[in-house]
Image (cartoon, rainbow, N blue to C red):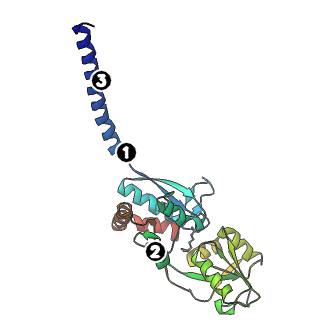
Amino acid sequence: MNMKKLLAIFLIIAMALTFAACGGGNDDQAAQDTPMTYKVAMEPTFPPFDTINQETQELDGFDVDLMNAIAEDQGFELEWVNMGFDGLITALQAGNIDIIASGMNASEERREKVDFSTTYYDSGLVVAVKTGNTAIKSIDDLTADMKAGAQIGTTGADLATELFDAGKIKEAKIYNGLDVAVMDLQNGTINALINDLPVTKAYMDVKPGTIEIVGDVLNAESYGFAVQKGNTELLDKINAGMQNIIDNGTFDDIAAEWFE
Ligand code: ARG
């Protein structure tokens, strides 16, 4: 092969390598400009925090609007996932999701497994009964022949199970969806429902005169967004975004939409 051909091949290889190097630079820049997308999960029978919009069939609620506002403020994107409440923490620990936004109480027990954002809503558990049931005026009136319902994996389920283990109720009936639990309270299948105050009120508003809250609020809960333990980068973004939307009034605007 003569020198001219060899030189031509060398030049072609050199140009190809140069082009690839430049192209790579563009790829790096493109990667830097593409926003991160995080998977965020919730269980949607928990209005007004976590629900399904009946018109769009999309996930909706205070948690959705809040987390979407935080994402916009911090320049990341979200992929929303509908998941059973009892599977959320396991999914987060396994890395199958990045965030839990599901009205989750930032309890000490859970803080051992995941990290929580700044809390954003103070709540508590209450007992609800079918309207007209005068036998139960508080949790103390539950008896060993009664059934108390709650949603699986929740603090309400923990309390119902405690009552059962102590022999104070006949059954702690645990439901995947709160909507079914409320229906069973309305039809008399269960005598009482142990659930979060604002959510029980939301179900009361849907069908007024069917269920009512009895007694006092039983505990103090504060909801937080959860991330995998040690994911300080994402946690810092969520906390910074939360503070920004509080400071600029967006938090109050969203709250007014869902609670007033
Ligand atoms: N606040 C209670 C807890 O943390 C109930 C949360 C249920 N949330 C839901 N989207 N179903 O256990």
Query: Do we see residue 78 in this rendering?
Result: yes
Query: Do we see residue 260 in this rendering?
Result: no
Ligand 1: quadrant of the figure: bottom right
In the picture, the disc for residue 16 is 3
Pair 2/1: label in front: 2
Q: Residue 134 appears at what percent x and percent y?
A: 73, 90
Crowding at dot 1, Cα within 10 Å, few <14 / some 14-19 / many 20+, comes out as few
Q: From mark 3 to mark 1, how far is it between C-alphas?
A: 27 Å
In the picture, the disc for residue 7 is none
* Quarter of the figure that contains the N terminus: top left
Count of labels in the image:
3
Pair 3/1: label in front: 3
In the picture, the disc for residue 112 is 2
Residues at discs 3 and 1 in contact (Cβ within 8 Å): no
Looking at the image, which residue is at 67% across and 91% down? 137
Task: Give the residue pinned by disc 1.
Answer: 34
Q: Quadrant of residue 236?
A: bottom left
The secondary element bearing badge 1 is classed as loop
State the residue in front, 94 or 182.
94
Q: Amino acid at mark 1?
A: Thr
The secondary element bearing badge 2 is classed as loop
Residue 194 as seen in the image, left or right of residue 17: right
> Upstream in the sequence, badge 2 or badge 3?
3
Q: Quadrant of residue 172?
A: bottom right
